[in-house]
Amino acid sequence: MIHHLLLLVTPAAHDTAKAIADTAKAILPTVAQPQDKMSLLELLWKGGVIMIPLGILSLISVFLIIERYIFIKRASRSGKNFLNSIRDMMQSNNIEAAKALCKSADNPQARMIAKGISRIGMPIKDIENAMENVGKIEVYSLEKNLNILGIIAGIAPMFGFIGTILGVIKIFYNISLANNISIGLIAGGLYEKMITSATGLSIGIFSFIAFHWLNIMVNKTIQKMEIVSVDFLDMLQDAQKKPQA
């Protein structure tokens, strides 16, 4: 009797399980179906009008970083034997050759030395002041437009937050008109407006890092200029003491 009951129950259970499986197959593809993918450009475009000034700021930032890096890198180059060559030429009283070497080097250190050579015969203090004036001009050239990069690092996140706030205001305005609060209405607009904040923060962080990195390069170049200047002045002082001995 139990065997007959199993025969009756098993086909029914099998049919029920099959029906559940068929239903699940019909439902699951619809539920698990991924959303349409968007490219990065399409995603950024959904940020709205505020993305235009953010795009301009990002282009300016990239241009300044590349331009300043190339300029500072070139300015920091100086031959290892540059000052030794100047010393040899000065000891042999070959002033014109020393000036030509400074001109061919074409870097801040060489221009400072060239100014010092042109003032030979004057008191050491006057030579030092002349070289310091040239050094100030060179430092200004090295730091040129770096402040703009610092400004971009500060205002880019602000533009992003403004875009997000304006978007949230628009969302709540639409809710007030629809007189209905739905997750789709809020989330659909909010994720688009958060794009501006993310973009602004990304530009700001990138510019902030680049600003301090370039300033480190400038400080290293200034240190090289100071070392070369001190060594050159010491060389002149030694040259003035020798005849007296």
Image (tube, grey):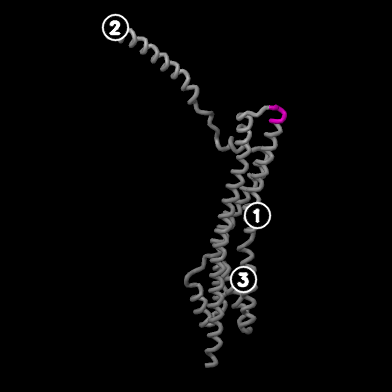
User: Sequence order check: which comes first, mark 1 or mark 3?
Assistant: 3
Q: Quadrant of residue 103?
A: bottom right
Rounded to the nearest whole Å, what is the CA distance between mark 2 and mark 1?
Answer: 86 Å
Q: Quadrant of residue 121?
A: bottom right
The three-letter code of the residue at mark 3 reads: Gly
Q: Is residue 123 visible?
A: yes
The residue carrying pointer 1 sits among few (fewer than 14), some (14 to 19) or many (20 or more) residues within 10 Å by Cα, namely: some
Q: Nearer the viewer, mark 2 or mark 3?
A: 2
* Identity of the residue drawn at 63% across and 64% down: 141
Mark 1 highlights which residue? 151
Asked if residue 51 is among those painted magenta in the image, a careful observer would answer no
User: Sequence order check: which comes first, mark 2 or mark 3?
Assistant: 2
- Is there a contact, CB below 8 Å, between mark 2 and mark 1? no
* Identity of the residue drawn at 56% across and 75% down: 229
| Of residues 31 and 88, the one drawn nearer to the viewer in this rendering | 31
For residue 99, above or below residue 237: above
Q: Nearer the viewer, mark 1 or mark 3?
A: 1
Mark 3 highlights which residue? 135
Residue 4's disc number:
2
The three-letter code of the residue at mark 1 reads: Ile
Rounded to the nearest whole Å, what is the CA distance between mark 1 and mark 3?
Answer: 26 Å
Rounded to the nearest whole Å, what is the CA distance between mark 2 and mark 3?
Answer: 106 Å
Range of the magenta residues?
175-179
Q: Secondary structure at mark 2?
A: helix
Q: Looking at this rendering, what residue extends furthest in the front direction?
A: 1
The three-letter code of the residue at mark 2 reads: His
For residue 89, above or below residue 188: below
